[in-house]
Amino acid sequence: MTADARNLAEDVADMTDDVPNLAEEAPEMRADVEGADGAEGSDADEAEGFPGGPRDPSVLTSFADHVAHAVWSGQERPNLKLVSHGRNVTLIGRPVPEIEGLVAATGLSPLIDCLVVTGDLGLISAFVERWHGETSTFHLPVGELTITLDDVSSLHHLPITGSLHSFHALSTEEARFLLTELLEVSAEEARAETALTRGAYVRLGWVRDIYEMRCQARRWIVAARAYLLHLSGSYAWGVVALVHMYDQLDEASRTTTRQLAGYLTLLQCVTDDTYQETSPRASRWLTSKAHMKGITGAPYRARCDALTVTDVSWLPYTEHRGVRAFELISSFQGQLRWGPMVVTARPERVVRQFGYIQSIPPPSVSARLSHDDIDDRWMHFAEHVLPASELCLVPGQVSADYMEWFFCISHTFMIPTQAGDQPRDAPAADPEEYIQPPSPQVPVAFDPPPHVDDYDGYEAIAQRLERVLNLRMVTAATKLYEIMQDCLTIARGGASADGSVRARQRRRTEH
């Protein structure tokens, strides 16, 4: 598919013609001098308090070509051009009532309500600077974060299960045949359109015109095909959305790249007070020019440098689970593909986003699998999911050695410190410092009964059940919720709902 301007790529200057190789001009990174804060770096880095690159380069192996290296060295990249695929829905509008059922049956209708009209360039650029393809994550002062399959499912209500999408490039003759068969255009119309676009492509405006004409002729099946072609022609759904976004972030994080495409609701948001929880979560955000201009505060780069664990919403969809439940496949570890495009999902690096304590992740496996092997692992995903870990006592908790390790392998800050500034060290991983924000709590009996056998074990079970309920990881009024409440009551020493079970009483011991 191409835009009405025939080719979006024609709007962007060649990515290598007018942009200098900032990585070559930036000073070479050194890793043989101790910095003032215990970090290895050059003499200049020592004065700044923290180096601009990883002290241990074994993880971010291509950092010298990364935009973060150039930014730290004082080389600013020209602004990115944002190409949002949400424009497709804006151009064609909602489907006519006669084909709404046909569109809904494809699972793509949530896209109609999830529009991104205007991108917040500052916000998106700040996160692009922190994306690394080696880890498929954003690197921030609090550790690593990423876009997961659960994000795609919760934000867009698109299916994330099923076979991975395969396709092959069409020849011009094949494209003409499909146009005549599926959209019922004449051979002359199909030939004229492909000749105008110089290949097996069609313009979105042309497809929109076909849709409107088929609606007028009450050719509803053909109209639905045209609508779906317009809706999804330059947008990938489900797993494909994640693959496409990862691939675009990998490309945009290089110093010479000047464009980022994709469905940008995966990267930005501004609150909409009219949002209804039954809608896709992406509908909660406003993205018009007026709202983008209304964002104020310090520059995003500085705000990201100052980020703390309490600034992050680690479990943002707890209120939405009754509408879109968490799916086990969201924690799949391994390679994903869209046709020949392959990326790697690494949830083991962001387990806090799944409610677990983050520890040092195992080394990444970079061996490229065949497409058949990728498909086979995906279809047997239960054998390749994130293993269960220790639940967080507080959101965002990490192991004692994680932050020290992370500061060694990453570029935690983007802005060099100035003369006289205090060195910036890895924050202590101390849950005692965390202050839980106010949130609705589940009423539970707090005082344990006296003389309960194996009290410590019951209390440990009760605390874990209470935490899951208070975080609203289970939807209220469901059968599972009632069972967990019943188990919590028993663990606290009360009787079960039907009165048949009660925690055993500890025998009294005479002294």
Image (cartoon, rainbow, N blue to C red):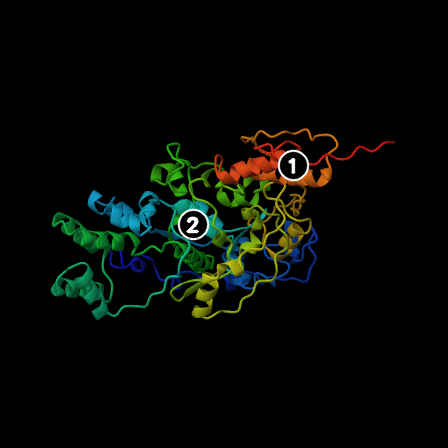
Quarter of the image containing the C terminus? top right
Q: Where does the N terminus fall, quadrant-wise?
A: bottom left
Residue for point 41% across, 36% down: 277
Please indicate whether residue 159 sits to the left or right of residue 67 in the image. Answer: left
Query: Against 349, is 122 above or below?
Result: above
Q: Residue furthest right?
A: 511
Q: How many marks?
A: 2
**Is 304 drawn above or below residue 45 in the view shown?**
above
Q: Position of residue 481 (x, y in %)?
A: 52, 38
Q: Could you say which disc has been placed on residue 152 in the image?
A: 2
Percent coordinates x, y for residue 294 in the rendering = 40, 35
Q: Residue at 22%, 63% (x, y): give it.
A: 197
Q: Nearer the viewer, residue 508 or 293?
A: 508
Query: Between 452 and 154, which is closer to the camera in this rendering?
Result: 452
Q: Residue at x 16, y 66 (%)?
A: 191
Per the image, the residue denoted by label 1 is 491
**Left or right of 256 in this view: 399:** right
Residue flagged by tag 1: what amino acid is it? Ala
Indicate which label's residue lies in the foreground, 2 or 1. 1
* Number of the label disc, if any, that sits on residue 30: none
Q: Secondary structure at mark 2?
A: helix
